[in-house]
Image: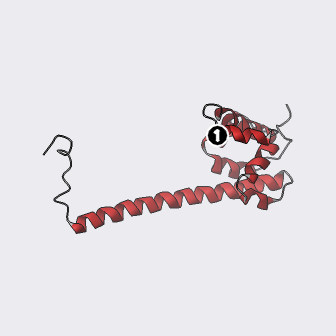
Amino acid sequence: MNSINSNVDLTGLSKQDALAAGEIAGGILGVVYTIVAIIYVLEIIGMWKIFVKAGIAGWKSIIPIYNLVLLFKLSGESPWLILLFFVPIANLYPALHQPYKLAKSFGKGIGCTLALIFFPGFAYMYLGLGKAEYVAAGGNE
């Protein structure tokens, strides 16, 4: 046996053990997919409510890409900045500045901005379902 394979010996694994390992991996993957789906649904609900607060029809939040265009407009940003998401390093600008401007649009500060960056689903729920009111695109700067 060479040094590459010396740590792992799969030849002794029975079919039953291999099936059990596959079931465990599949179960873990199912849990991860479920969590991602729940977070995505929370994000849609929050974005729907954000749009309603800003005077935009809520159903527009479920249309991919178009919902980003509207989110950028709500933030007082040019929707063309979405194209920067495809440019390495330059994508940091819209990824950090748009959440800041969205938080400002609802009269919120850096805490909400950080939540929008790191936990967007929950932050959208906070803005959409909370007491935050839409002030103006980009806030009152």
Instruction: In this rendered view, identify the residue nearer to me: 9 or 127.
Output: 9
Q: Quadrant of the C terminus?
A: top right
What amino acid is at disc 1? Phe
Foreground residue, 81 or 130? 81
In this rendering, the answer to whether 19 lies above or below 125 is below
Residue 24 x/y as whole percent = 35, 62
Which residue occupies 46% across, 60% down? Answer: 31
Relative to 5, is 52 above or below? below
In which quarter of the view is residue 62 placed?
bottom right
Q: Position of residue 121 (x, y in %)?
A: 64, 51
Which residue is label 1 attached to? 86
The image quarter in which residue 18 lies: bottom left
Position of residue 19 in the picture relative to residue 77 (left or right): left
In the image, residue 90 lies at what x, y percent?
Answer: 65, 31
Classed neighbour count for the residue bearing mark 1: other residues with Cα under 10 Å, few (<14), some (14–19), many (≥20): few
Residue 53 vertical position relative to residue 83 in the rendered view, above or below:
below
- Residue positioned 66% across, 42% down in the render: 116
Task: Name the outermost residue toward the bottom.
Answer: 16
Q: How many marks?
A: 1
Q: Residue furthest left?
A: 1
Q: Position of residue 100 (x, y in %)?
A: 72, 36
Residue found at x 74% / y 52%: 67
Observer-nearest of 81 and 136: 81
